[in-house]
Image (spheres, grey):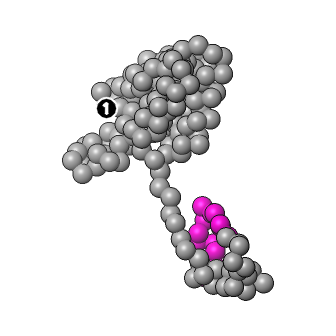
Amino acid sequence: ALLKTLEEPPSYVIFILATTEVHKLPITILSRCQRYDFKRITIDTIAARLKELTGAENVQVEEKALRYIAKVADGSMRDALSLLDQCGASGGRIDGERVLDVLGLAGNVQTAELMDCLLRRDAQSALLLLDRLYSGGKDVGALLGELSTLTRDLLIRMTAPEGGAALLSGGYDN
Protein backbone atom coordinates (compact mmCIF):
# COMPACT_ATOMS: atom_id res chain seq x y z
CA ALA A 1 0.00 0.00 0.00
CA LEU A 2 2.91 2.37 0.82
CA LEU A 3 4.54 1.71 -2.56
CA LYS A 4 1.27 2.35 -4.38
CA THR A 5 0.76 5.60 -2.45
CA LEU A 6 4.32 6.71 -3.15
CA GLU A 7 3.95 5.93 -6.86
CA GLU A 8 0.63 7.71 -7.30
CA PRO A 9 0.09 10.15 -4.44
CA PRO A 10 -2.81 12.57 -4.47
CA SER A 11 -1.74 15.96 -5.88
CA TYR A 12 -2.07 17.65 -2.47
CA VAL A 13 0.20 15.20 -0.62
CA ILE A 14 3.92 15.49 -0.01
CA PHE A 15 5.71 12.73 1.87
CA ILE A 16 8.81 13.52 3.86
CA LEU A 17 10.67 10.48 5.12
CA ALA A 18 13.48 11.33 7.52
CA THR A 19 15.99 8.82 8.80
CA THR A 20 19.56 8.55 9.99
CA GLU A 21 19.65 4.93 8.79
CA VAL A 22 19.04 5.12 5.05
CA HIS A 23 20.63 1.69 4.60
CA LYS A 24 17.62 0.14 6.35
CA LEU A 25 15.12 1.45 3.80
CA PRO A 26 14.14 -1.03 1.09
CA ILE A 27 15.41 -0.16 -2.37
CA THR A 28 11.82 -0.21 -3.62
CA ILE A 29 11.09 2.78 -1.37
CA LEU A 30 14.36 4.59 -2.12
CA SER A 31 13.86 4.30 -5.87
CA ARG A 32 10.62 6.27 -5.59
CA CYS A 33 12.02 9.12 -3.51
CA GLN A 34 14.12 12.21 -3.99
CA ARG A 35 16.96 12.08 -1.53
CA TYR A 36 18.43 15.02 0.33
CA ASP A 37 21.41 14.42 2.60
CA PHE A 38 21.88 17.06 5.26
CA LYS A 39 25.35 17.88 6.46
CA ARG A 40 26.70 19.18 9.73
CA ILE A 41 26.87 22.93 10.11
CA THR A 42 30.34 24.35 10.82
CA ILE A 43 31.28 25.78 14.20
CA ASP A 44 31.83 29.21 12.62
CA THR A 45 28.38 29.19 11.00
CA ILE A 46 26.64 28.12 14.21
CA ALA A 47 28.53 30.69 16.30
CA ALA A 48 27.70 33.47 13.82
CA ARG A 49 24.00 32.57 13.83
CA LEU A 50 23.92 32.42 17.64
CA LYS A 51 25.61 35.84 17.78
CA GLU A 52 23.00 37.21 15.39
CA LEU A 53 20.14 35.77 17.49
CA THR A 54 21.53 36.93 20.83
CA GLY A 55 22.13 40.38 19.36
CA ALA A 56 18.52 40.59 18.21
CA GLU A 57 17.32 39.55 21.68
CA ASN A 58 19.76 41.91 23.48
CA VAL A 59 21.40 39.01 25.32
CA GLN A 60 24.90 39.74 26.52
CA VAL A 61 27.11 36.84 25.43
CA GLU A 62 30.84 36.35 25.14
CA GLU A 63 32.28 35.19 21.79
CA LYS A 64 34.10 32.34 23.53
CA ALA A 65 30.80 31.13 25.00
CA LEU A 66 29.23 31.00 21.55
CA ARG A 67 32.15 28.96 20.23
CA TYR A 68 31.88 26.48 23.13
CA ILE A 69 28.17 26.04 22.46
CA ALA A 70 28.74 25.66 18.71
CA LYS A 71 31.44 23.07 19.32
CA VAL A 72 29.31 21.00 21.70
CA ALA A 73 26.33 21.20 19.31
CA ASP A 74 28.36 19.06 16.90
CA GLY A 75 26.91 20.46 13.69
CA SER A 76 23.29 20.78 14.87
CA MET A 77 21.72 24.23 14.98
CA ARG A 78 18.76 22.88 16.96
CA ASP A 79 21.11 21.51 19.63
CA ALA A 80 23.03 24.80 19.68
CA LEU A 81 19.82 26.75 20.31
CA SER A 82 18.82 24.35 23.11
CA LEU A 83 22.25 24.67 24.72
CA LEU A 84 22.08 28.46 24.46
CA ASP A 85 18.70 28.40 26.20
CA GLN A 86 20.12 26.23 28.99
CA CYS A 87 23.08 28.54 29.48
CA GLY A 88 20.91 31.66 29.49
CA ALA A 89 18.17 30.29 31.77
CA SER A 90 19.49 32.02 34.88
CA GLY A 91 19.67 35.40 33.14
CA GLY A 92 22.57 37.79 32.96
CA ARG A 93 25.64 37.72 30.77
CA ILE A 94 26.59 34.38 29.23
CA ASP A 95 30.33 33.90 29.36
CA GLY A 96 32.66 30.99 28.71
CA GLU A 97 32.76 29.93 32.35
CA ARG A 98 28.98 29.73 32.60
CA VAL A 99 28.82 27.55 29.48
CA LEU A 100 31.50 25.23 30.85
CA ASP A 101 29.69 24.98 34.19
CA VAL A 102 26.23 24.38 32.70
CA LEU A 103 27.53 21.75 30.28
CA GLY A 104 29.90 20.11 32.78
CA LEU A 105 32.93 20.71 30.58
CA ALA A 106 36.52 21.26 31.68
CA GLY A 107 37.41 23.61 28.83
CA ASN A 108 40.35 23.74 26.48
CA VAL A 109 42.99 24.91 28.96
CA GLN A 110 42.29 22.29 31.62
CA THR A 111 41.88 19.55 29.00
CA ALA A 112 45.25 20.53 27.52
CA GLU A 113 46.77 20.50 31.04
CA LEU A 114 45.45 16.99 31.59
CA MET A 115 46.82 15.89 28.21
CA ASP A 116 50.19 17.38 29.13
CA CYS A 117 50.22 15.37 32.38
CA LEU A 118 49.42 12.23 30.42
CA LEU A 119 52.12 12.89 27.83
CA ARG A 120 54.69 13.47 30.59
CA ARG A 121 53.46 10.25 32.24
CA ASP A 122 52.86 12.23 35.43
CA ALA A 123 50.08 10.09 36.91
CA GLN A 124 50.00 11.96 40.22
CA SER A 125 49.41 15.37 38.60
CA ALA A 126 46.87 13.88 36.19
CA LEU A 127 44.91 12.27 39.03
CA LEU A 128 45.03 15.44 41.14
CA LEU A 129 43.74 17.50 38.22
CA LEU A 130 41.07 14.92 37.44
CA ASP A 131 40.00 14.93 41.11
CA ARG A 132 39.83 18.73 41.13
CA LEU A 133 37.70 18.72 37.97
CA TYR A 134 35.41 15.95 39.23
CA SER A 135 35.01 17.63 42.63
CA GLY A 136 34.19 20.86 40.80
CA GLY A 137 31.20 19.18 39.14
CA LYS A 138 32.72 18.42 35.76
CA ASP A 139 31.26 15.46 33.88
CA VAL A 140 33.90 12.73 33.50
CA GLY A 141 32.25 11.47 30.31
CA ALA A 142 32.37 14.96 28.81
CA LEU A 143 36.00 15.31 29.92
CA LEU A 144 36.86 12.07 28.14
CA GLY A 145 35.12 13.43 25.06
CA GLU A 146 37.20 16.61 25.29
CA LEU A 147 40.38 14.54 25.63
CA SER A 148 39.34 12.45 22.65
CA THR A 149 38.74 15.57 20.56
CA LEU A 150 42.11 17.03 21.55
CA THR A 151 43.84 13.73 20.70
CA ARG A 152 42.07 13.65 17.34
CA ASP A 153 43.06 17.27 16.58
CA LEU A 154 46.69 16.57 17.51
CA LEU A 155 46.73 13.47 15.32
CA ILE A 156 45.28 15.37 12.35
CA ARG A 157 47.77 18.23 12.80
CA MET A 158 50.67 15.77 12.88
CA THR A 159 49.60 13.55 9.97
CA ALA A 160 47.88 16.04 7.65
CA PRO A 161 48.88 19.57 8.65
CA GLU A 162 47.62 21.15 5.45
CA GLY A 163 44.84 18.96 4.09
CA GLY A 164 43.24 18.10 7.42
CA ALA A 165 42.32 21.62 8.54
CA ALA A 166 38.63 21.10 7.70
CA LEU A 167 38.53 18.09 10.02
CA LEU A 168 39.76 19.94 13.11
CA SER A 169 37.30 20.63 15.91
CA GLY A 170 38.24 24.30 16.11
CA GLY A 171 38.51 24.12 19.89
CA TYR A 172 42.28 23.92 20.17
CA ASP A 173 43.53 26.46 17.67
CA ASN A 174 45.56 28.46 20.16
Q: Is residue 57 magenta?
A: no
Q: Give the number of marks.
A: 1
> For residue 119, which quarter of the picture?
top left
Per the rendered image, the range of residues in magenta is 15-27
Q: Residue at x 56, y 25 (%)?
A: 57
> In terms of depth relative to the viewer, which is nearer, 26 or 122?
26
Q: Is residue 140 visible?
A: no
Q: Residue at x 60, y 61 (%)?
A: 20
Q: Secondary structure at mark 1?
A: loop
Q: Is residue 166 left or right of residue 54?
A: left
**Rendered view: 18 above or below 115:** below
**Rendered view: 80 above or below 133:** below
Instruction: Check disc 1 and give the amino acid type.
Output: Asp
Q: Residue at x 66, y 22 (%)?
A: 89
Residue 148 point in image, percent of width and height: 45, 39
Residue 62 point in image, percent of width and height: 45, 20
Point out the image quarter for the C terminus.
top left
Q: Which residue is mark 1?
A: 173
Q: Residue at x 35, y 32 (%)?
A: 172
Q: Is residue 5 left or right of residue 65?
A: right
Magenta portion: prevailing SS class: loop
Q: Is residue 14 visible?
A: yes
- In the picture as drawn, the residue positioned furthest to the left comes out as 162
Residue 107 point in image, percent of width and height: 46, 24
Could you classify mark 1 by the number of other residues whose Cα lies within 10 Å: few (under 14), some (14-19), or many (20 or more)? few
Q: Is residue 55 left or right of residue 86?
A: left
> For residue 26, which quarter of the picture?
bottom right
> In terms of depth relative to the viewer, which is nearer, 109 or 17?
17
- In the picture as drawn, the residue positioned furthest to the front comes out as 12
